[in-house]
Amino acid sequence: MAIFEKLNPVKATLDDTVNLVCSLENAQNINRHTEYILRIQRGPGKDNSWTVSRRYRDFASLHLSLQHANIGLPLPPKKLIGNMQPSFVAERQIALQNYIDEVLKHLILALSLPVRRFLDPVNYSKNIGDEALQTVSIALRGDGEYELKGPLPEINWRIRKHYFSVIDSEKTNFLLAWQSYGPDKYLHTKDLQTCFKSLQNISHPYIDGILAIHSLETGAYVVRRLHEKGSLRDIIYGTEYDKNYLAKYGNPKIRKPLTKGQIAHYGYQILQALRFLHDKGLPHGHLHPGNIFIENQRILLVDMENILLGASSIYRPYLRELRHSTPEAVDVYSFGRTLYEMAFAETLEGCYCDKFDGLFDDIESVLHLTLSSTSWKRGGVSLEELLQHPFFTRAINGFPRDVKGHLKFPLVLKNDLKEAVIAVEGRLKVDQKLVRNARRELRIKEILGSETEMRKQRRRAKKRDSLWKSTSSLAETVNSHSASTTSSPTPPATTVGENSGLSPPSSNGRGALLQAICSFDKSSLARINSR
């Protein structure tokens, strides 16, 4: 049985987490309005770039769609008179460049559909939500087990994942998630459906069960219980599960970090669930507070199927900068970022963090092991080492150390699943190498640029030295001329008994001039710019 299937036109292979870089190259006046030419680059490779033409009103529309995030963005104000003048257009181009840089600096905005559609209209022009609704409606009619109530739009960060409210025959509410296949889908569709059957039978105290899961031609849908209290991230920011994603997490007004005891309690349970999945050959790969629910002081981990569907992690922009790419390293790093958000009630900006102010020693030690650059230089830590950390061992009194669960894949599928996980790791390694090469090239350019600047400085120094030398030679010439003049005196009016020596100057004016020339000091000259 073939494990890897060939890419087909309906499979979504675009990675929505790849960084986009935008630069405003030019501005042109067309039909009494100004259009700005944007150069967009996807990822570190400069060969993957294109141009987009946008007007100011397009920037204003984008700004309006991002207002839910409650993040201050420096959009320049509108001007009705004189907005076609070259000086004003140049100033506005600089201001719009500053605006788009600020937008892309925030990961939650950079990954949102409005920003992606603004910068990449070719790949994001379709109404993905309507397509998902149509696909799910047809699939549920054929299944007959659940009835579609309606969509829950924009409650999560993924562009190609959509949530719907469904009910069963007893009118009980459930949550259906439709996910399109991503760039890391390597299992054949038949093998994928076999894996789904095993996942549907999973049993573990810290993993939420799956009620129904089915793969289709373009993606798969999963039905789970509806947790009306929301995810762990909703609890941290005091919001509701069905609200707009940008409004919930962009710049939340409420922030409720967890206590030290809660972090140790829930963190230990998360580690138990991760170790169980790794022992079964299925790393999670998508751990974050939005994939964790809490019920009766017990965490419930969800979205284990994401790695099989080929979806990219929300932390992938940071994973590309990480020094390791093994499945365990990815889950350990994601666990550290999850604990950071639990402790500070905010997401970590950047890949690494080496200082954790205001924390207790034990939890600071855990965060240092999972997030610091020095720890990852030494290879990081394992899940088992974290489970043995004193921060967790002291907090598990009354909890079983060895939690048992059930997840069994068919023997013929285990090797295929292992190869698929290796392929996921391989693509991440390629991305990490591209990022390192891009940084190396940038560093070389900076060095070359600094060397060019040094050469310019040396040329300027030579010019200054030549100017000083010419000034010095002029002064020496004057001094030598003065000396030769004094050595050939005019005929004096000698007096008997007086030594023959220097005669007094023939006139007061000539003596003053010679005295001034001889006493000239070149160090008193003011320095000038020879440019």
Image: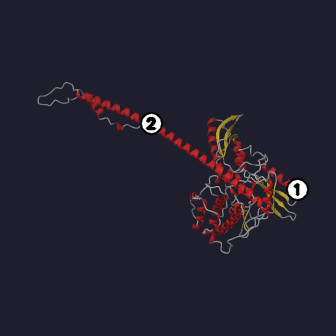
Q: Which type of secondary structure does the marked residue at label 1 adopt?
A: helix
Inspect this view and state whether residue 163 appears: no
Quadrant of the image occupied by residue 345 = bottom right
Colour basis? secondary structure
The dot on residue 466 is none
Q: Position of residue 390 (x, y in %)?
A: 60, 69
Depth order, front residue of 438/129: 438
Depth order, front residue of 353/492: 353
Residue to which mark 2 is pinned: 529
- Outermost residue toward the top in this view: 491
Q: Which type of secondary structure does the marked residue at label 2 adopt?
A: loop
The dot on residue 142 is 1
- The three-letter code of the residue at mark 1 reads Gly
Label 1 close to label 2 by CB (< 8 Å): no
Quadrant of the image occupied by residue 92 = top right
Label 2 packing within 10 angstroms: few (<14), some (14-19), many (20+)? few
- The three-letter code of the residue at mark 2 reads Asn
Count of numbered marks: 2
Label 1 packing within 10 angstroms: few (<14), some (14-19), many (20+)? few
Q: Position of residue 125 (x, y in %)?
A: 76, 45
Where 152 sits versus 40, above or below?
Answer: below
Instruction: State the quadrant of the N terminus.
Output: bottom right
Q: Position of residue 402 (x, y in %)?
A: 69, 71
Whole-number angstrom distance, CA of label 1 to CA of label 2: 83 Å
Where 262 sits versus 464, above or below?
Answer: below
Q: Position of residue 286 (x, y in %)?
A: 70, 58
Quadrant of the image occupied by residue 499 = top left
Inspect this view and state whether residue 284 appears: yes
Q: Residue at x 67, y 35 (%)?
A: 28
